[in-house]
């Protein structure tokens, strides 16, 4: 009976990890789009490009929060999980305003830097969640052997 409870708990954690991984991959895709629009903006994209770029940034932030919510389900005692909860894409209201109002190379570069920083965080989180899920699957499989 105890073995079944452990398997059920492992399955719940694995499901949460899969949901988080899915959200992280959506974030990754949105950030890739934001990066591309940001590069266009660096070369004089204009107002429309800013709208699309910031839309992708907003979508990324939404899915980051979704992923963090799923990651909170993981057991608290795992130190690696705490890193995931720090995922953040904070462009800030002033920088967003400056990007639209001034639309200059400096603000475009600053926004692009924030996008690239978030991309690195998400890539690292994806790799660690994937590794964590592999380890959980091995543990789950070992419970079947008992």
Image (cartoon, helix red, strand yellow):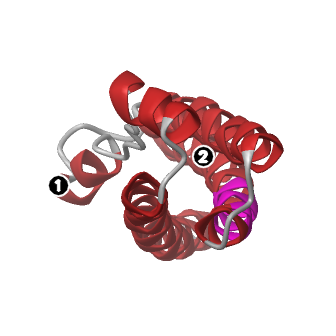
The image position of residue 53, as x and y in percent, is 70, 48
Percent coordinates x, y for residue 108 in the rendering: 49, 57
Query: Is 136 rendered above or below residue 49?
Result: below
SS label for mark 1? helix
The quarter holding residue 50 reads top right
Q: Quadrant of residue 88?
A: top left
Q: Which mark is residue 20?
A: 2
The quarter of the picture where residue 95 lies is: top left
Q: Is residue 119 positioned above or below 97 on the image?
A: below
Rendered-image quadrant of the N terminus: top right
The quadrant the C terminus occupies is bottom right
In-front residue for pair 47/11: 47
Q: Which mark is residue 79?
A: 1
CA separation in Å, label 1 and label 2: 17 Å
Q: Which residues lie in the magenta part? A: 28-37
In this image, 85 relative to 16: left or right? left
* Residue 3 spot, x, y in % from top left: 51, 47
> Looking at the magenta stretch, what is its main secondary structure?
helix
Q: Is residue 32 magenta?
A: yes
Q: How many marks?
A: 2
Residue 35: % across, % down: 63, 66
């Amino acid at each position: 009976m105890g073995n079944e409870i452990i398997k059920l708990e492992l399955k719940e954690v694995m499901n949460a990890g899969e949901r988080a991984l899915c959200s992280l991959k959506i974030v990754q895709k949105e950030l890739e789009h934001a990066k591309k629009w940001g590069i266009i903006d660096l070369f004089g994209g204009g107002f429309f490009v800013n709208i699309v770029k910031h839309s992708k940034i907003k979508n990324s932030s939404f899915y980051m929060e979704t992923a963090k919510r799923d990651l909170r389900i993981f057991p608290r005692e795992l130190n690696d999980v705490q890193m995931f909860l720090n995922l953040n894409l904070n462009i800030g209201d002033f920088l967003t305003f400056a990007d639209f109002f001034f639309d200059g190379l400096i603000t475009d570069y600053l926004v692009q830097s924030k996008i690239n920083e978030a991309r690195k965080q998400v890539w690292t989180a994806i790799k660690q969640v994937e590794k964590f899920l592999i380890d959980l699957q091995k543990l789950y499989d070992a419970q079947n052997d008992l």
